[in-house]
Image (cartoon, rainbow, N blue to C red):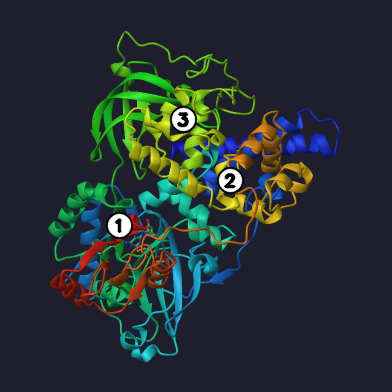
C-alpha cells in the first residue's frame, strides 16, 4: 500500500519535472539539465511505471518516447458485468455475511445454505469467450462493463485451452452458441522469479501480480508467451445450457481442461468454512503460487440472481483476505550489496525469525530513502511483513522498544567491495559504485548474468565457481571464460578433473547459442530479452550494432532514448574494442546465423508417452520438445516405451506403464530432463 502511495507521489513529481524540462528545452530553448540527466529522470519514471503498471496514464511523458508500450487494445463489452468482490479481513464479518445470506434465503423459502470455499488467486481477472468450443475472445475486466480485448496475449497462456474438445458433450444445446469462462491470470512463484532474474536489475517487478498485469499489456505476444503465465478458472456460464451449482461448474471446468486449483471445498456450515480458512492459512505457503485469501460463494447458482448485487459486488459471495503475516525481530546489521550494474542495495541482517512458514534472516531495505522513511537504526526492534509477496520486507520500527545502544545507519562513502568512492546522481535514489571495470562484485554479477538461464545458459557455472575465478583474478570479463584451461581449473577448490571437463564442454556448447542471446547476455543496462531480440533483427551483427548512432537506435521498435543511450554508452567505452575482439576470438555468436539454435539430444532414441494434463505445456509443445531432442512420442504404452510423463489426473495408461515397469516421471522431472 504505502509503496504504491509513495510511488504515486514520486511518479507525479517526475512527470511534472520532465514536462518542465521538456518545455525549457523545446519551447524556451533554455535547458537546465544535460541530456544525460534528463534521460536519467525519464529512465526513473519508466522503471517506476514498470513496477506499478496501474499508475501508467496515457498522458505520461513516458508514453511519448516509445520507452514503454503505447498501443491501446480495442475495447469490448462484457456479456454480463464483471463484478468484483467485497473483501474482509475479519472472521466476524464473515459470520455476518453468512447470516445475512441465510436471512435473504429464508425470504426465498430456501433453508439450505451450502457454500463453496475457493482459494483466492492473486492475479488479474479476465473473461474468456468460447464459441462452439473455440476460444474467440479474451478480455480484461476494465471498468467491469467494458474491458480490453487481449485475445492474442491470452492465447499464449498454455493453461488456457484454445479449443474445448468435450464442449459438445457438456453443452449439447450450445453447439452454436457461447460459453464464458472467467478466472485469474497469475504467475507461479518460480516463473516470477525466473522472469525477474532475467531482467535488468532496475526493471524488476515488485511481485507476481504486477508482473502479470504488466505482461498482459505487452504488444509483443511472443514476449508474453515467454513470461510463462498461468490461468485458474473459477466461473463458468453457458448461455443456453442448464445451470448447475458452483461446485459442479468447477468440475465441468476441469472436464473442459481448465486448471481450477483443485483445492475448493463444499461447506455445509460455518464451521467448515472457518476450518478451510484456518487450514489454508498455513498450507498456502507451500503452494507454487500466491494466494491472498479465500473466496466464499453460495453453491446454488440459481440463487445468485435472486440475491443480486450491490453496485460493485454480488451479495452471494465474499472474499476473506489473510492478514499480511508479521513478526518482530532485531536489526543486527545492515550490509551493502553491489549489483552487476554497480547499484548499492542496503540489506538488513536480522535475528532469524519464523515468518509465514520459513525462517527469515535477511530482508532488502531497497535504498537509503527507504531507510530514512522508516527512521530505522541499528539494533532497533523492527516489524517485518510478508503479504502476497515472496520476499519479506521491513515495514516499521517499534519505537517504544528502542534500546539505548542504537546507532545510525551510515551511507557508506566507499564501495564495500572495492573501496571506490560511491556516486549518486541527483535524480536517483540509489548510490552506485562507478568502478565498473574493476569492482569484483560487478564483475561477478556480469559473469553470473552471462551464464544465467535466459542468457548463455551455462549451468555448470555457479556462484561458488565465479567467486573463485574473480578472487583469483582468473577471469575479468566473460571473454576470459573461454581462455580457461583444464589444468588451471583442476587446481581449484572442489573441482576435479570431471567437473573441469564439464565446465569446458558447457562453455563449448554456449558458443552455439544465438546472437540474440549473446546480446542479452552482455548485460547492457535496460537491454532485456525483448530488446535484445529487436536489436538482433535491426542489426544482424555486433559490428553493425556498435556503429549505430543513438538517433538510429531510437528508430528501432520499442527502443526509446534512454535505452538507445545506454547501448551507445556501452559500445563507446574505451575498453569496448578489446572486449569485442576477445568475444570474437572466443568464437561467440556475434552475428545472426541461419541455423536454428542447437538444443541438446537428451532424448535420442527414447519413446515417450504423455498421460494426464501438464501445467506448463500443452501436448503439442511437450511433444515438440521431445522431438527436437531426438526422441519419439507415442500414444500407447508398451514394453518398448522408454518413458511415461504423468501429469495431473493421469488415465489408465499410467496403471499399465506401472505394471509393465516402464519408467514414470512427473512434469517437474520431465522438465529437468529437458
Ligand atoms: S469470483 C463476482 N473467485 O479476486 C465474482 N474471484 O477481490 C467474481 N479472485 O475480482 C470473482 N480468486 O479478480 C473469484 N476463486 C476466485 C478468485 C477470485 C481470485 C479475484 C478476482 C476478483 C477479486 C476480488
Name the residue nearer the viewer: 91 or 504.
504
Q: How many marks?
A: 3
Work out whether 233 lies above or below 523. Answer: below
Q: Determine contact: label 2, label 3, CB under 8 Å.
A: no
Quadrant in the rendering for residue 223: bottom right
Residue 615: percent from left, percent from top: 34, 63
Position of residue 195 relative to residue 461, above or below, is below
What residue sits right under mark 3 in the picture?
366
Neighbour tally class for label 1: few under 14, some 14-19, many 20 plus, Cα within 10 Å: some
Quarter of the image with the C terminus in it: bottom left
Q: Residue 236: x percent and y percent?
A: 35, 74
The residue sitting at 30% across, 57% down in the picture is 668
The residue indicated by pointer 1 is: 668
User: Can you see residue 81?
Assistant: no
Q: Under 8 Å from ligand 1: the CB of mark 2?
A: no
* Image position of 66 (left or right of 511): right
- Of helix, strand and loop, which one carries label 1? helix
Amino acid at each position: 500500500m504505502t509503496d504504491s502511495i509513495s510511488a504515486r507521489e514520486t511518479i507525479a513529481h517526475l512527470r511534472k519535472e520532465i514536462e518542465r524540462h521538456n518545455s525549457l528545452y523545446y519551447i524556451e530553448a533554455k535547458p537546465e539539465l544535460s541530456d544525460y540527466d534528463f534521460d536519467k529522470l525519464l529512465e526513473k519514471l519508466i522503471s517506476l511505471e514498470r513496477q506499478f503498471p496501474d499508475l501508467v496514464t496515457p498522458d505520461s511523458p513516458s508514453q511519448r518516447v516509445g520507452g514503454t508500450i503505447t498501443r491501446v487494445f480495442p475495447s469490448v463489452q462484457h456479456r454480463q458485468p464483471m463484478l468484483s468482490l467485497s473483501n474482509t479481513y475479519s472472521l466476524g464479518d464473515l459470520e455476518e455475511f453468512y447470516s445475512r445470506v441465510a436471512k435473504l434465503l429464508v425470504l426465498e423459502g430456501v433453508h439450505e445454505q451450502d457454500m463453496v470455499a475457493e482459494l483466492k488467486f492473486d492475479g488479474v481477472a479476465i473473461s474468456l469467450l468460447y464459441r462452439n468450443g473455440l476460444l474467440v475472445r479474451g478480455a480484461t475486466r476494465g471498468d467491469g462493463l467494458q474491458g480490453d480485448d487481449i485475445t492474442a496475449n491470452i492465447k499464449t497462456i498454455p493453461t488456457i485451452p484454445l479449443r474445448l474438445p468435450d464442449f459438445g458433450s457438456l453443452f449439447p444445446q450450445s453447439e452454436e452458441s457461447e460459453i464464458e469462462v472467467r478466472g485469474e491470470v497469475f504467475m507461479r512463484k518460480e516463473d516470477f522469479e525466473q522472469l525477474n532474474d532475467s531482467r535488468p536489475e532496475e526493471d524488476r517487478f515488485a511481485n507476481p501480480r504486477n508482473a502479470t498485469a504488466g505482461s498482459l499489456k505487452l504488444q509483443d505476444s511472443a514476449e508474453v508467451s515467454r513470461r510463462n503465465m498461468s490461468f485458474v478458472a473459477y466461473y463458468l456460464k453457458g448461455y443456453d445450457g442448464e445451470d448447475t451449482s458452483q461446485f459442479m461448474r468447477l468440475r465441468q471446468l476441469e472436464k473442459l481442461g481448465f486448471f481450477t486449483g483443485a483445492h475448493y471445498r463444499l461447506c455445509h456450515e460455518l464451521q467448515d468454512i472457518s476450518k478451510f480458512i484456518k487450514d489454508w492459512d498455513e498450507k498456502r505457503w507451500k503452494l507454487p503460487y500466491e494466494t491472498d485469501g479465500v473466496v466464499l460463494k453460495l453453491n446454488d447458482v440459481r440463487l445468485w440472481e435472486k440475491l443480486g448485487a450491490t453496485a460493485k459486488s454480488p451479495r452471494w459471495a465474499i472474499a476473506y483476505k489473510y492478514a499480511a503475516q508479521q513478526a518482530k525481530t532485531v536489526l543486527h546489521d545492515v550490509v551493502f550489496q553491489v549489483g552487476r550494474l554497480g547499484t548499492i542495495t542496503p540489506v538488513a541482517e536480522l535475528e532469524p525469525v519464523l515468518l509465514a512458514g520459513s525462517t527469515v534472516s535477511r530482508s532488502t531495505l531497497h535504498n537509503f530513502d527507504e531507510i530514512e522513511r522508516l527512521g530505522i537504526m541499528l539494533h532497533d526492534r523492527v516489524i517485518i511483513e510478508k503479504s502476497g509477496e515472496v520476499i519479506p520486507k521491513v515495514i516499521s520500527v517499534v519505537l517504544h522498544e528502542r534500546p539505548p545502544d542504537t546507532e545510525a545507519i551510515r551511507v557508506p562513502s566507499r564501495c564495500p567491495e572495492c573501496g571506490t568512492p560511491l556516486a549518486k546522481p541527483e535524480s536517483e535514489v540509489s548510490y552506485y559504485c562507478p568502478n565498473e571495470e574493476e569492482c569484483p562484485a560487478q564483475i561477478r554479477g556480469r559473469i553470473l548474468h552471462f551464464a544465467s538461464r535466459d542468457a548463455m545458459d551455462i549451468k555448470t557455472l555457479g556462484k561458488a565457481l565465479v567467486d573463485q575465478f574473480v578472487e583469483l583474478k582468473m577471469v575479468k570479463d566473460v571473454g576470459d571464460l573461454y581462455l580457461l584451461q583444464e589444468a588451471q581449473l583442476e587446481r581449484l577448490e572442489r573441482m576435479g578433473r570431471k567437473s573441469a571437463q564439464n565446465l569446458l564442454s558447457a562453455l563449448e556448447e554456449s558458443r552455439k547459442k544465438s546472437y540474440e542471446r549473446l546480446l542479452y547476455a552482455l548485460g547492457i543496462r535496460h537491454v532485456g530479452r525483448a530488446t535484445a531480440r529487436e536489436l538482433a533483427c535491426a542489426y544482424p551483427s555486433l559490428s553493425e550494432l556498435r556503429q549505430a548512432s543513438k538517433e538510429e537506435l531510437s528508430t528501432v521498435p520499442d527502443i526509446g532514448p534512454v535505452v538507445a543511450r545506454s547501448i551507445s554508452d556501452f559500445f563507446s567505452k574505451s575498453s569496448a574494442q578489446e572486449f569485442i575482439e576477445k568475444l570474437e576470438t572466443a568464437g561467440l555468436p556475434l552475428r545472426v546465423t541461419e541455423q536454428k539454435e542447437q538444443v541438446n539430444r537428451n532424448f535420442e532414441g527414447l519413446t515417450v508417452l504423455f498421460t494426464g494434463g501438464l501445467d506448463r505445456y500443452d501436448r503439442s509443445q511437450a511433444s515438440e520438445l521431445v522431438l527436437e531432442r531426438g526422441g519419439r512420442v507415442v500414444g500407447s504404452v508398451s514394453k518398448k516405451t522408454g518413458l511415461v510423463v504423468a501429469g495431473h489426473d493421469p488415465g489408465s495408461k499410467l496403471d499399465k506403464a506401472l505394471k509393465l515397469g516402464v519408467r514414470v516421471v512427473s512434469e517437474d522431472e520431465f522438465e529437468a530432463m529437458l
